[in-house]
Image: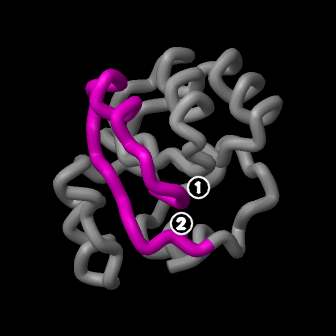
Amino acid sequence: MIVKDIVTLLDAHYVSNSGLENENYDVAFASDLMSDVLTIDIPNVLLITGLANIQTIRTADMAEIKCIVLGRNKKATPEMIELAEENEITIIECAYSLFHICGLLYNEGIDPLF
């Protein structure tokens, strides 16, 4: 599923757009534990999290994750947005719970990482 369709499905909006609206994602991973995110070793994983702080962006960069969905109506800080743009990471904000986000994406064919 491409990013712009994910945004539509989740009734979400871009906060940081790295120009990857047409990037395709087949796998997603939901976690608030950034230590778990660092174990990801496959490309093109969509990260779903409720952790809205600068460490989320740093971790995504280290794990080579290029798209983050912030759930639970969490808001990206200006520092997060700035760092995401520097590292070409897209941030999407969504009001839905992580469970709801995962369910919607799963129903549309996005596979879980594990």
What's the residue at 71%, 67% (across, down)?
Answer: 21
Mark 1 element type: strand
* Residue 114: % across, % down: 19, 57
User: Was residue 34 drawn as part of the magenta stretch in this picture?
Assistant: yes
Q: Quadrant of residue 61?
A: top right
Q: Which residue reaches farthest front? A: 41
Q: Is residue 92 left or right of residue 20?
A: left
Taking the spot 60% from the left edge, 20% from the top edge, the residue there is: 77
Q: State whether residue 81 is above or below residue 6.
A: above
Q: Which residues are magenta?
A: 24-45
Could you say where residue 1 lies in the image, as x and y percent from the top left?
A: 50, 79
Residue 37 position in % (x across, y down):
36, 34
Q: Which of the 4 quarters of the picture holds residue 40?
A: top left
Q: Is residue 94 left or right of residue 89?
A: left
State the mark number for residue 79: none
**Which labelled disc corresponds to residue 7?**
2
Disc 1: which residue: 13
Mark 2: few/some/many CA within 10 Å (<14, 14-19, 20+) = some
Query: Left or right: where does residue 48 sit relative to residue 5?
Result: left
| Mark toward the start of the polypeptide (1 vs 2) | 2
Above/below status of 24 relative to 59: below
Residue extending furthest bottom? Answer: 108
Q: Position of residue 104 (x, y in %)?
A: 27, 72
Q: Tag count in the figure?
A: 2
Residue type, label 1: His
Callout 2, which amino acid? Val
Q: Residue at x 36, y 59 (%)?
A: 28
Using the numbered discs, state the Cα–Cα distance from disc 1 to disc 2 in whole angstroms.
Answer: 6 Å
- Say if mark 1 contacts mark 2, CB within 8 Å: yes
